[in-house]
Image (cartoon, rainbow, N blue to C red):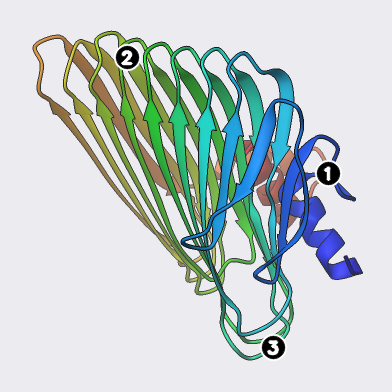
C-alpha cells in the first residue's frame, strides 16, 4: 500500500497496516490480501464480484476486517459480500470504504452486504465511509446492508460518514425472528453541495423481537440530507426510530419516519428533531475562551459522538 491507501485504511478501519486475524483487503477493484482463521473462512464468489464469509458456530472473541480502498479516479466498483454467522457465535466485523479522488472523473463504490445470523448469534458491525482528494471528480458511495436474523440473535451496527463523500444512497433492510434484537447507530455530516440519503426498513416478524434505529446528522453549507425510516410491527415486538439533525449555513434535512403496527401488541415509537445550534450553547463555550467557530466544532463533535 502507498501512503494514500494507508491513510484511507486508518480512516475507515482504524488500523495502520494489514490487520491481525481474518481479513480481506480490496484496493482499486481488486483483491489485495486475505487471511482466514480456524473459525472464519473467506471464499471468493464465482458468479459475481465479492466474497462469502463463513463464521463457524460458537466462534468467540474474533474479528474480521474487510475494508475497500479506492485511490484511482474514474473507477466504478461493485462488490457483493455475504456473511454467514453460525449459531452462538460472537464476533466483530469492521468494514467501510475510503475513496481518494484527485482527478476529474467520478469514482464510485457500491457495496451490497448481506448478513445471515443463526440462532443466538451476535455481531458488532462497524462501517465507516470517508472521502478525500483535491480533484473535482465526484466521490460516490452507495452501501446496502441486508440483515436476516434468526431466533435470539443480536446485531449492533455502527455506521458513520463524516467527511468527503459527495453523494450517497444508504439502504438498510432487516427482518427479525423471535427474540432477535437489532440496534443501529448512524452518524452523517455533509458540507458543500453534498447529498446523503438514508433508508431504513425493518420487519419485526417474531414475538419478542425489537429494533432501535438512531440517526444523528449535521448538514453544513448547501448540502442536503433525506432520512427515511420504516418499521413494521408484525408481532408482539418493540420498535423505535429516532432522527436528530443540526442545520448550519444553508443546509437542508428532511426526516420521514413511518411506523406500521400489524399486531395488537406491537409497540412502536418514532421521533424526529431538526434545528440549528442553540445560541446559548455557543455563548457558554465562548465564555470559556473558545472562538465561535471552535464552539460550533465542539458542539458538533459532541453531537456526533
Task: Name the N-terminal-most of marks 1 and 3.
Answer: 3
**Could one spot residue 22 in this view of the protein?**
yes
Q: State the image quarter where residue 187 is shown.
A: top right
Q: Is residue 230 left or right of residue 171?
A: left
Number of residues whose C-alpha sits closer than 10 Å to that of mark 3, classed few (under 14), some (14–19) or many (20 or more): some
Find residue 39 and report its image quarter: top right
The number of callouts visible is 3
Image: 291 above or below 149: below
Number of the label disc, if any, that sits on residue 103: 3
Q: Pick whichever of labels 2 and 1 is earlier in the sequence.
A: 2
Residue 110 disc label: none
Q: Is residue 200 above or below residue 105?
A: above
Q: x and y percent of residue 31 in the render? A: 71, 62
Identify the disc placed on residue 289.
1
At 72% from the left edge and 30% from the top edge, which residue is drawn?
63
90 or 4: nearer the viewer: 90
Residue 287 in view (yes/no):
no
From the top left corner, tell me how far across and down residue 232 is, in percent.
20, 29
The reply, left or right, for residue 174 in relation to residue 113 is left
Q: Which mark is residue 209?
A: 2
Amino acid at each position: 500500500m502507498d501512503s494514500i491507501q494507508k491513510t484511507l485504511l486508518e480512516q475507515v478501519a482504524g488500523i495502520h497496516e494489514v490487520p491481525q486475524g481474518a481479513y480481506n483487503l480490496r484496493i482499486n477493484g481488486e483483491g489485495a490480501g486475505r487471511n482466514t482463521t480456524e473459525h472464519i473462512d473467506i471464499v471468493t464468489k464465482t458468479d459475481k464480484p465479492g466474497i462469502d464469509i463463513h463464521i463457524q458456530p460458537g466462534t468467540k472473541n474474533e474479528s474480521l476486517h474487510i475494508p475497500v480502498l479506492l485511490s484511482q479516479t474514474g473507477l466504478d466498483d461493485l462488490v457483493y459480500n455475504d456473511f454467514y454467522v453460525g449459531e452462538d457465535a460472537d464476533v466483530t466485523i469492521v468494514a467501510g470504504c475510503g475513496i481518494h479522488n484527485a482527478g476529474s472523473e467520478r469514482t464510485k463504490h457500491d457495496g451490497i452486504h448481506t448478513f445471515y445470523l443463526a440462532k443466538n448469534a451476535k455481531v458488532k458491525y462497524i462501517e465507516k465511509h470517508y472521502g478525500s482528494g483535491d480533484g473535482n471528480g465526484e466521490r460516490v458511495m452507495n452501501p446496502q446492508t441486508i440483515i436476516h436474523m434468526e431466533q435470539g440473535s443480536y446485531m449492533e451496527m455502527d455506521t458513520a460518514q463524516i467527511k468527503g463523500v459527495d453523494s450517497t444512497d444508504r439502504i438498510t433492510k432487516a427482518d427479525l425472528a423471535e427474540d432477535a434484537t437489532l440496534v443501529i447507530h448512524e452518524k452523517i455530516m455533509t458540507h458543500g453541495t453534498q447529498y446523503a440519503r438514508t433508508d431504513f426498513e425493518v420487519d419485526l416478524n417474531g414475538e419478542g423481537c425489537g429494533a432501535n434505529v438512531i440517526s444523528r446528522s449535521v448538514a453544513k453549507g448547501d448540502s442536503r440530507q433525506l432520512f427515511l425510516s420504516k418499521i413494521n410491527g408484525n408481532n408482539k415486538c418493540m420498535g423505535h426510530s429516532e432522527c436528530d439533525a443540526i442545520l448550519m449555513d444553508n443546509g437542508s434535512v428532511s426526516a420521514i419516519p413511518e411506523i406500521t403496527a400489524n399486531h395488537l401488541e406491537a409497540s412502536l415509537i418514532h421521533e424526529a428533531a431538526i434545528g440549528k445550534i442553540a445560541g446559548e450553547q455557543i455563548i457558554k463555550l465562548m465564555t470559556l475562551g473558545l472562538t465561535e467557530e471552535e464552539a460550533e466544532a465542539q458542539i458538533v463533535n459532541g453531537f456526533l459522538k
